[in-house]
């Protein structure tokens, strides 16, 4: 994924303002109009509300430092209003809520208002993108249609250390199709002593084994290291070798610009509760390229929501299948759960992924700069995420010496700093382009420097 050359980098700002590890640089960056955020659209937890007892500002009622959007994004303020409206119409109109325009949101078509905005975030065309189910359910549904093994081509390529949902799904589908995962699952791994998977190693593996691989299934962004894969190149090479190519975009959607259609990806799934800020367990997203839009003979696990709305309630059990991704839908949408997706995608619709990416690059560049230049962290912290900005998104994964990961986490939480741990050795730090400030980044590193490393 190449970043446009006209996007200002952190180095550009550093050159303009001069090197500094003081808070003054953070405040200057926050004052730049082109680096403005959408912070006012979100609820920001306070130090006190996340269990903190100390504050770098001296007041635990002040906003904390939230660096955990790679795990759960913060709540858009409009969610409360939308939930109240849906409860109101339900209480007053009962079953008529499905078509009611009382608050401008007939339930039967909520997804139809969300999807056009979502298409812009992930780079899909009309008919290719939908919101439905959850990530793992969508993964299973699309694997059922796109993992089509034969005796000569039955293997699946995944990354070593893949997220458990992907790992379990791959193994379960292979078993269901009568193949042994021990023989059929190929794991691409970092080289010994390295943390990241080299692109050239992925290329060589596909070139050497592509003839026996039925499905390439990789993340857009690796959840543990924050590594961004070269999705377009992997897809092109996989197709040249006759492989179906799909991606898990759980850590990519809302994080980095995506071009699912242009990159010619066959299918993909993602969740909406990380960078997409739609609440835990929110309905997920799915993509199927439009070259399959009228492939009605493709096997699929079908439900009544795949039936065209115009004839859905005829109830004659003669399937009138929707074209495109809508033909893979199964069930009625969970109305209240969709409020988070709706609220979040409306914030994304105020900007573009390119603009958010520009801000994200400066945020993570500043975070990297402080970690490498402040007194304690420069000696005690190792960043395992790539230094190449083309190979990372909002997340920097950092390691510490010794076995004090939990102590560090608790120290940070005491100051109202929220990150997450991925044992045995990684703290994931993810300033969000939508709402994190440069002052947040400075406060994070300043508080980390207060920890007494052994």
Image (tube, rainbow, N blue to C red):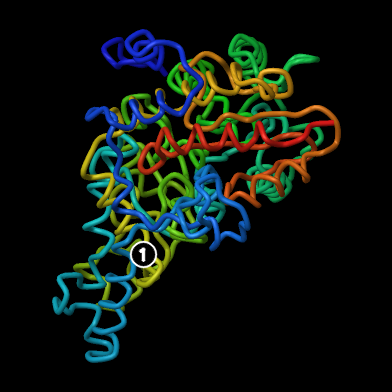
User: Quarter holding the C terminus?
Assistant: top right
Residue 260 sits in which quadrant? top left
Left or right of 418? Residue 340 is left
Nearer to the camera, 38 or 149: 38
Nearer to the camera, 261 or 318: 261
Q: Is residue 152 visible?
A: yes
Give me the residue at 65% from left, 35% from top.
Answer: 448
Left or right of 421? Residue 406 is right
Give the percent coordinates (x, y) of residue 444. 56, 37
Q: Is residue 133 visible?
A: no
Q: Which residue is mark 1?
A: 338
Give the percent coordinates (x, y) of residue 141. 51, 53
User: Quarter holding the N terminus?
Assistant: top left
Nearer to the camera, 228 or 42: 42
Left or right of 282? Residue 335 is left
In the image, residue 387 above or below residue 314: above
CA neighbours of label 1 inside 10 A, class few (<14), some (14 to 19), many (20+): many
Give me the residue at 55% from left, 33% from top.
Answer: 219
In the image, residue 363 above or below residue 3: below
**SS at badge 1:** helix
Give the percent coordinates (x, y) of residue 165. 64, 48
Give the percent coordinates (x, y) of residue 70. 53, 42
Residue 381 sits in which quadrant? top right
Residue at the limit of the structure toward the front, as seen here: 58
Residue 120 sits in which quadrant? top left
Give me the residue at 29% from left, 51% from top.
Answer: 40
In the image, residue 131 above or below residue 146: below
């Amino acid at each position: 994924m190449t970043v446009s050359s006209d996007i200002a980098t952190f180095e550009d700002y550093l050159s303009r303002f001069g090197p500094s590890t003081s808070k003054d640089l953070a405040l200057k960056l926050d004052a730049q109009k082109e680096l403005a955020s959408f912070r006012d659209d979100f609820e920001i937890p306070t130090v006190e509300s996340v269990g903190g007892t100390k504050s770098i500002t001296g007041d635990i009622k002040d906003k904390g430092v939230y660096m955990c959007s790679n795990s759960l994004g913060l709540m858009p303020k409009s969610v409360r209003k939308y939930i109240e409206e849906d409860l109101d119409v339900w209480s007053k109109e009962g079953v008529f809520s499905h078509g009611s325009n009382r608050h401008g949101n007939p339930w039967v078509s909520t997804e139809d208002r969300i999807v056009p905005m979502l298409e812009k975030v992930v780079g899909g065309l009309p008919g290719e993108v939908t919101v439905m189910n959850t990530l793992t359910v969508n993964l299973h549904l699309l694997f059922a249609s796109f993992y089509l093994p034969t005796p000569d081509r039955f293997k699946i390529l995944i990354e070593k250390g893949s997220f458990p949902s992907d790992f379990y799904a791959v193994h379960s589908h292979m078993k269901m199709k009568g193949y042994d995962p021990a023989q059929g699952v190929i794991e691409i791994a970092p080289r010994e002593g390295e943390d990241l998977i080299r692109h050239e190693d992925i290329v060589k593996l596909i070139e050497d084994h592509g003839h026996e691989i039925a499905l390439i299934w990789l993340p857009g962004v690796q959840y543990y290291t924050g590594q961004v894969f070269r999705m377009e190149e992997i897809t092109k090479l996989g197709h040249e070798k006759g492989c179906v190519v799909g991606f898990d975009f759980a850590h990519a959607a809302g994080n980095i610009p995506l071009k699912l259609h242009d990159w010619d990806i066959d299918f993909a799934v993602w969740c909406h509760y990380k960078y997409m800020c739609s609440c835990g367990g929110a309905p997920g997203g799915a993509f199927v390229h439009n070259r399959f839009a009228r492939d009605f003979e493709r096997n699929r696990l079908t439900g009544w929501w795949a039936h065209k709305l115009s004839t859905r309630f005829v109830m004659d059990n003669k399937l009138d299948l929707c074209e495109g991704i809508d033909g893979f839908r199964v069930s009625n949408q969970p109305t209240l759960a969709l409020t988070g997706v709706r609220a979040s995608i409306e914030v994304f619709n105020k900007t573009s992924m390119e603009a958010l990416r520009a801000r994200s690059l400066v945020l993570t560049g500043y975070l990297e700069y402080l970690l490498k230049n402040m007194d304690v962290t420069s000696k005690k912290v190792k960043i395992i995420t790539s230094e190449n900005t083309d190979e990372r998104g909002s997340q920097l994964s950092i390691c510490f010496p010794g076995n004090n990961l939990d102590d560090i986490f608790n120290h940070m939480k005491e100051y109202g700093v929220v990150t997450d741990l991925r044992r045995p050795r990684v703290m994931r730090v993810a300033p969000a382009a939508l709402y994190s400030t440069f002052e947040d980044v400075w406060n994070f590193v300043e508080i980390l420097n207060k920890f007494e490393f052994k």
